[in-house]
């Protein structure tokens, strides 16, 4: 009821009451009078009727005015105060209630405003603290990400169910699975946030390692670690160290472990070099034993029988000569073949030669105050070095040049020479003399009170390198040349890795709290699940009529975030030509598909990409039919739960006629870019899906099970594709 | 009676010395260069002792020794294994499959001859 109407009713009631009281009073007076008096009064009233009506109207007007004022003060003002208070509380914290109405109500409004001010101050304070805390956390996260990305080891951290919640770039590189037959050696990384580590390593192996760690923990071993060697997806041998991550008492599984860390080392090359060493030893022992036996027997026979005839003696002597020659050949061959393995074990690291020189220059300039310059430096050369000791050696040479020969500047050059790199330390000045340079190599090195246990000669020897002094008379320059074997880097140079600016999200600690994925998937919150959102492009619309997949694109959603660096994108050779219509829709021509892998090679990789996630697609039935038709042929089953954005859109907007992806995207404010590429559509579907989640929640759909049930109830779901 | 020695080795340069030494000691000698021929020669030539190289083509010395030991008719044949494989495991294996002695190359010819004589004396 409107306020005016209530007032009108109240006024009518008040007037009615006054009139009724006046009429009642008049009736009582009239009843008390004698007949003559009543007649006289009636005459008086009748003759004064206009005056009485005017007086009554005045009285009623006065009542209306008084009531109006009272209404304003004691009814309207509290109502407005209540409304103002609600606005302050819910919609606009900055709103304040004006002080109106009676003095009491105005005072109440003042108190309300004071409360709101105090609340605002408190909120500002809390906001500031939250902001500070968030900034600190972000900083620590960035620091951790930076640290992880610089680690030489591969690191993968998983929660107790094997879901990856942190990894570094090295791990991403190591744990890639090359796609058989793919052009350009394309490989898909198997690590990704929220993905299962069991898609990479055998589940039983990890469980066994966890068990043994727990067992040792129970036996009182502090910080127990399990170590095992297994093979990575691409076939490398990997040494894995597993350590549990302790969780708070309230979280995680038995023993208080919230998860585990895997430290991975690619030991393929180390094992190879070990095998080479074994072969060397074997070839040296067995090979030489036989020859020595032959020689020894021949010699001893000749010695034992001095009177044997000449042909027999010549024959024995011939054998000795032959075996001696065979021994020499064998030794030569072994020395060349196993040159690397012959070197002593020494902790060497792979390093770009240019980086070594840069480090040496910094050290020489800082420690000796000696200016340095660069001549020709081949940036592509990689060396196997103990960078610190080699840098010490180079600085030591520079120091002696400065102190003993007044050299004012040194220069560096680096050039390849077959399997070696020539690292030159160059200067101009008085000739050194060969004896001097020889003694420098064997003198104890000491620089600025920093002794070094090795001599320069020993350092060089440990690198399998050689050093010598040379004079280039025409150019009037002298140099020390260190010839050092070139190595090839283990992996692509780091410049090819993501830089700090584009550092992808390698961690998501919220995954520690993610509950069981396997048992009660349907009860899980939609916001907490991991999804693979995918799309396929095909040669046509009829899978049973022979149409085939030509492209698969997929992205992942973990903890409500679209991970744009975890993308699956692969063209597929359909082994049949593209129709003109299909090319028109997809922009994919037959020529683009030549040399691409066939579906039986792509599906296992895609299967691994979406392992243990919920699949999401727009009009999923269409894409799934293509996938399911290949299950028998490829052995890859897609049995995960599936959500369809088409059906979800029908759940949200049952009254709308169209649920095409473009239309939904427009409704949801998603930018339709890169449409009709599989990965473009997958990204768009993912963004649409993410924006649907809060709308579904408003409709009371919070869990996977609820979303699936609601989807199934839509009329669209009743039409099968 | 003249004792008979079978030399089974595919390295001609050692065979020359072994054959010369054994003949000098007055033994009847037959030489073969692979395991298969050695097996045939054991049947035909009926040696008292075999100087057996471990690494031989067709049939290795280990296998040959096992075949000899599996036949009770050949129980009296003495086997000396000669090998460039000198690790403990290899010596153990040689003795386990039936060698009477395992001699690692290079060896002293004097010691070898002494071993041959000792084994043949034991067999008498």
Image: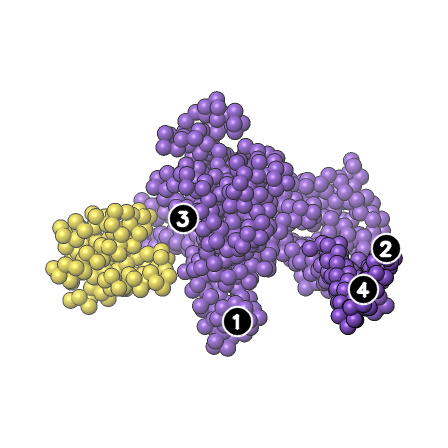
- Residue reaching furthest left? B73
Residue A718, located in which quarter of the rendered image?
A: top left
Q: Secondary structure at mark 1?
A: helix
Left or right placement of residue A676 versus residue A280 in this view: right
Q: Tell which circle, 3 or 4, labels the residue nearer the N-terminal end.
A: 4
Of the two numbered discs 3 and 1 on the same chain, state the one appearing first in sequence: 1
Give the answer, above or below, for where A77 lies relative to A382.
Answer: below
**Nearest the eye: A300 or A143:** A143
Chain corresponding to purple in the figure: A
Q: Residue at x 45, y 51 (%)?
A: A709
Gap between marks 4 and 2, in whole Å? 19 Å
- Whether residue A627 sits left or right of residue A4 in the image: it is left
| Residue A256 image label | 1
Height in image: A290 above or below B120? above
The residue at which mark 3 appears reads as A639
Task: Report whether A93 appears left or right of A226.
Answer: right
Badge 3 or badge 2: first in the primary sequence: 2
The x and y percentages for residue A220 are: 50, 77
- Identify which residue is drawn at 51% across, 45% down: A651
**Residue under numbered circle 4:** A39
Secondary-structure class at tag 3: loop
Q: Which residue is mark 2?
A: A50
Residue A558 visible in this rendered orientation of the protein = no
Q: Are marks 4 and 1 on the same chain?
A: yes
**In this view, the mark in front (3 or 4):** 4
| x then y, percent, for residue A674 | 59, 34
């Amino acid at each position: 009821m409107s306020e005016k109407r209530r007032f009108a009713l109240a006024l009518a009631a008040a007037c009615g009451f006054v009139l009724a009281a006046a009429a009642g009073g008049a009736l009582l007076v009239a009843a008390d009078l004698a007949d003559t008096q009543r007649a006289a009064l009636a005459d008086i009233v009748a003759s004064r009727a206009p005056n009485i009506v005017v007086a009554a109207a005045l009285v009623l007007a006065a009542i209306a005015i008084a009531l109006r004022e009272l209404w304003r003060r004691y009814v309207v003002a509290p109502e407005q105060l209540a409304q103002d208070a609600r606005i302050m509380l819910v919609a606009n914290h900055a709103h304040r209630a004006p002080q109106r109405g009676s003095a009491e109500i105005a005072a109440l409004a003042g108190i309300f405003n004071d409360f709101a001010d105090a609340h605002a101050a408190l909120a500002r304070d809390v906001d500031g603290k939250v902001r500070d805390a968030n900034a600190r956390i972000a900083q620590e996260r960035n620091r951790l990400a930076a640290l992880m990305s610089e680690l030489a080891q591969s690191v993968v951290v998983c929660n107790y169910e094997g879901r990856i919640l942190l990894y570094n770039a090295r791990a991403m590189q190591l744990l890639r699975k090359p796609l058989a037959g793919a052009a350009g050696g394309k490989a898909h990384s198997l690590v990704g946030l929220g993905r299962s580590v069991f898609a990479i390593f055998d589940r039983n192996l990890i469980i066994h390692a966890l068990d043994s760690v727990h067992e040792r923990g129970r036996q009182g071993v502090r910080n127990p670690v399990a170590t095992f060697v297994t093979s990575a997806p691409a076939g490398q041998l990997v040494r894995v160290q597993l350590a549990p991550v302790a969780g708070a008492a309230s979280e995680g599984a038995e023993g208080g472990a919230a998860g585990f860390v895997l430290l991975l080392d690619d030991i393929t090359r180390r094992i190879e070099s070990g095998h080479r060493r074994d072969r060397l030893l074997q070839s040296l022992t067995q090979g030489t034993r036989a020859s020595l036996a032959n020689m020894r027997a021949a010699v001893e026979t000749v010695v034992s029988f001095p009177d044997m005839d000449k042909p027999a003696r010549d024959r024995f002597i011939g054998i000795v000569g032959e075996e001696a020659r065979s021994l020499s050949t064998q030794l030569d061959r072994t020395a060349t073949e196993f040159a690397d393995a012959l070197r002593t074990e020494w902790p060497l690291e792979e390093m770009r030669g240019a980086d070594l020189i840069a480090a040496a220059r910094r050290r020489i300039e800082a420690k000796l105050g000696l200016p340095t310059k660069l001549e020709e430096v081949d940036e592509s050369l990689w060396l196997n070095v103990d960078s610190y000791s080699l840098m010490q050696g180079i600085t030591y040479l520079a120091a002696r040049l400065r102190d003993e020969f007044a050299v004012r500047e040194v220069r560096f050059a680096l050039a390849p020479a077959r399997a070696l790199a020539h690292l030159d330390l160059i200067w101009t000045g008085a000739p050194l003399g060969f004896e001097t340079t020889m003694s420098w190599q064997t003198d104890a090195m000491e620089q600025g009170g920093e002794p070094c246990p090795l001599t320069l000669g020993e350092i060089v020897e440990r690198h399998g390198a050689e050093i010598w002094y040379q004079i280039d008379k025409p150019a009037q320059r002298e140099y020390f040349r260190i010839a050092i074997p070139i190595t090839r880097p283990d992996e692509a140079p780091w410049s090819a890795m993501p830089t700090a600016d584009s550092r992808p999200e390698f961690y998501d600690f919220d995954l520690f709290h993610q509950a069981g994925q396997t048992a009660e998937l349907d009860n899980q919150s939609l916001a907490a699940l991991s999804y693979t959102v995918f799309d396929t492009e095909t040669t046509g619309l009829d899978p049973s009529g022979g149409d085939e997949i030509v492209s698969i694109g997929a992205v992942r959603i973990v903890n409500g975030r679209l991970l744009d660096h975890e993308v699956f994108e692969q063209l597929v050779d359909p082994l049949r030509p593209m129709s003109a219509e299909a090319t028109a829709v997809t922009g994919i021509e037959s020529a683009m598909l030549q040399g691409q892998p066939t579906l039986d090679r792509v599906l296992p990789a895609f299967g691994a990409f979406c392992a243990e996630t919920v699949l999401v697609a727009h009009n999923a039935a269409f894409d799934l039919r293509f996938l399911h038709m290949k299950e028998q042929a490829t052995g890859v089953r897609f049995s995960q739960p599936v959500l369809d954005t088409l059906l979800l859109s029908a759940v949200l907007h049952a009254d709308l006629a169209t649920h095409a992806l473009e239309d939904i995207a427009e409704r949801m404010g998603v930018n339709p870019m890169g449409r009709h590429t599989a990965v473009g559509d997958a990204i768009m579907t993912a963004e649409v899906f993410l924006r649907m989640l809060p709308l579904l929640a408003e409709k009371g759909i919070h869990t996977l099970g609820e979303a699936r049930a609601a989807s199934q109830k839509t009329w669209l779901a009743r039409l099968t594709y | 009676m003249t004792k008979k020695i079978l030399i089974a080795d595919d390295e001609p340069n050692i065979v020359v010395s072994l054959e010369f030494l054994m003949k000098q000691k007055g033994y009847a000698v037959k030489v073969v260069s692979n395991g298969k021929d050695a097996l045939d020669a054991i049947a035909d030539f009926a040696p008292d002792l075999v100087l057996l190289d471990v690494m031989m083509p067709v049939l290795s010395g280990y296998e040959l020794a096992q075949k000899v030991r599996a036949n009770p008719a050949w129980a009296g044949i003495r086997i000396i294994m000669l090998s460039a494989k000198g690790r403990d495991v290899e010596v153990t294996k040689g003795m386990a499959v039936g060698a009477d002695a395992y001699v690692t190359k290079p060896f002293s010819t004097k010691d070898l001859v002494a071993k041959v004589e000792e084994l043949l004396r034991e067999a008498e």
